[in-house]
Amino acid sequence: MCGIFGCLCEGAPKVLLEGLKRLEYRGYDSVGIALINGDELFVEKNKGKIDEFILGLDEARLKGEIGVGHTRWATHGAPSKENAHPHLDCSKRIAVVHNGVLENFLQIKEELLKKGHIFSSRTDSEVIPHLVEEYLNEGLTLKEALVKSMERVKGSAAIAMISTVEPERIYCYRRESPLIVGISERGVFCASDIPAIMPYTRRVMVVPDDRLVVLERGSIQIEDLRGVMYKTEFTEVTWDLELAEKGGYPHFMIKEIFEQPRAIRDTLKIPTIFLDKAARLLTGRIYLTGSGTSYHACLSTSYTASDLVGIEMRPMISSEFADALLSLESSTVIAVSQSGETADTLNAVKHAKSKGAKILGITNTLGSSITTLSDAYICTQSGPEIGVAATKTFLTQLVALDLLLLRLGLISGRLSESAHRSITHELEALPGMVEQILRRADKIRDLALKYSKKENAFFLGRGANVATALEGALKLKEISYIHAEGYPAGESKHGPISLIEPNFLCVFIAPRDRTRERIIGNIMEMKARGAEVFSVITEGDDELKEISDEYFEVPRANEILYPIICTVPLQLLAYYAATFRGFDPDRPRNLAKSVTVL
Ligand code: AGP
């Protein structure tokens, strides 16, 4: 995943760099900008993070009122100055930034090489400016050349292009990868997401798929590749930019963990009308699919669905979905994705659609690809999540899915009015419970100091809390680089237990639910082999306090809420362990916020 930004406004160099800073979470291995000043195209790019990049810039050369920029997460070609965007044509008149993956670039590159084009990078993206140049040389206008180029390339692409041939315009195009545009008295803007342009305008529009955009001073035109104009409808962003900035916290991740009570409160307000539309879609066999943390939400929900409404829902990792040869005719697939852009999940959705399944999307990103591919969708109300590690979006996915199950239960008659009322009431208490946990974050910080010296950890749970264990382990490993595995506690004795030696860390998800007695058995097994046991328990559970080396208490709750509240101390543990080990939790190595490659 990469971030693109473009602006046509006064003070463009500063706006460009500020915009890229807000997009850095989308990729941070290289960065670059292009500006037009008079008839000169100024380009600067490099490997590394944006702050270092800015330090190396010669301010005197940053001039002009039109520019594009890019933050990169490498897919084709290692992070390097040459592979950083913008990419240029041979005559250095055209600068292009691209987010996406071009499938047929090798073939196009070969053709262009034969025609004498000289490439300076190993990226797929560089074919775009050369292709545009080729068509320009054939006598097409810049716009016609771009249209023809976009018809030629296959794959996903959000691009922004400037050229000294038409120095007053930014041309953009969107296919699959996200692109939004915005307008205000200050100027016109395009970017990969809304927060990037929010300091300059709140009037934004999500560009529909397969559309060309022309940004000029005071106007934005959207059309399809045949030149048919598309009505521009701007909406006013109502949420606060605060949500997308650190607001005094050292990292986005900890800010986002502390935002969870608010995010849950807002998600609880999803109008019933949307939930009912979504619930009515759920007929036939029901599958849940997602990747990483979103898959954990699917797994957890599969337990809750059987428990709460007696409906079987099969959880599937998205990258395995197509290979599982599922019976998809007359089925429904609930596709869960924070970004709505994860390639594996989109692939599963496309496969399911092609086999006749209906799609219900659960996403945090309005206008994302998943919303366009779904028959109905529910938007979780987390607000933008910038930290690469998913935190608030996981909790709100679980809440949204619980709300959906409640409506499904009511509509199908599987849940009585009074049961519906009483569980809804319990869900409403969730924000308060999470606040209570967050007030005791210091206890987790102290434990994290100790555990940050470990090299391995097991996270063990039963029932829906297997998903909690998997999520706890994923959080710890992805940002602190401690090797952590989540496992069903009952399964651990069938092999993994042989790894246990004195002081091996075992984190147990052990709330007061139907699994408690058997979890106690598993704790004893691990302790007998010298493991160091840290348990997440229900407040006042003296027996578990007694047998655990360390414990953290969560409030007493309905069983279906434990996967939500037990996750919070595990998120904190991962965050603090990463910081004690000296790593930046917002930018784990090799990862990007959304993974747009298969
Ligand atoms: C979570 O901490 C991860 N970084 C990752 O597993 C993520 O959940 C996964 O890539 C799916 O993303 P999505 O929800 O945007 O589809």
Image (cartoon, rainbow, N blue to C red):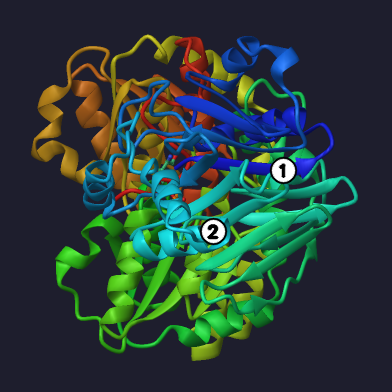
Real-space Cα separation, disc 1 to disc 2, in angstroms: 15 Å
Residue that label 1 marks: 7
Image marks 1 and 2: residues in contact by CB distance under 8 Å: no
Residue 462 x, y percent position in the rendering: 31, 49
The three-letter amino acid code for the residue at tag 2 is Tyr
Residue that numbered label 2 is attached to: 173
Q: Decide which of tag 1 and tag 2 comes sooner along the chain.
A: 1
Displayed quadrant of residue 243: top right
Q: Is residue 238 above or below residue 530?
A: below
From what the image shows, is residue 252 above or below residue 140? above
Image-quadrant location for residue 35: top right
Q: Quadrant location of the N terminus?
A: top left
Q: Amino acid at mark 1?
A: Cys
The image's mark for residue 400 is none
Residue 185 lies left or right of residue 405; in this view the side is right
Between 142 and 317, the residue placed more toward the observer is 142
* Nearer to the camera, 431 or 142: 142
Q: Going 25% across and 20% down the picture, which residue do you hit?
A: 531
Q: Find out if the beta carbon at label 2 lies less than 8 Å from the nearest ligand 1 atom.
A: no
- Residue appearing at x 62%, y 19% in the figure: 442
Q: Can you tell which quarter of the image residue 454 is in?
A: top left
Secondary element type, mark 1: strand
Query: Relative to 135, is 549 above or below?
Result: above
> What residue is rendered at 19% in x and 75% in y?
326
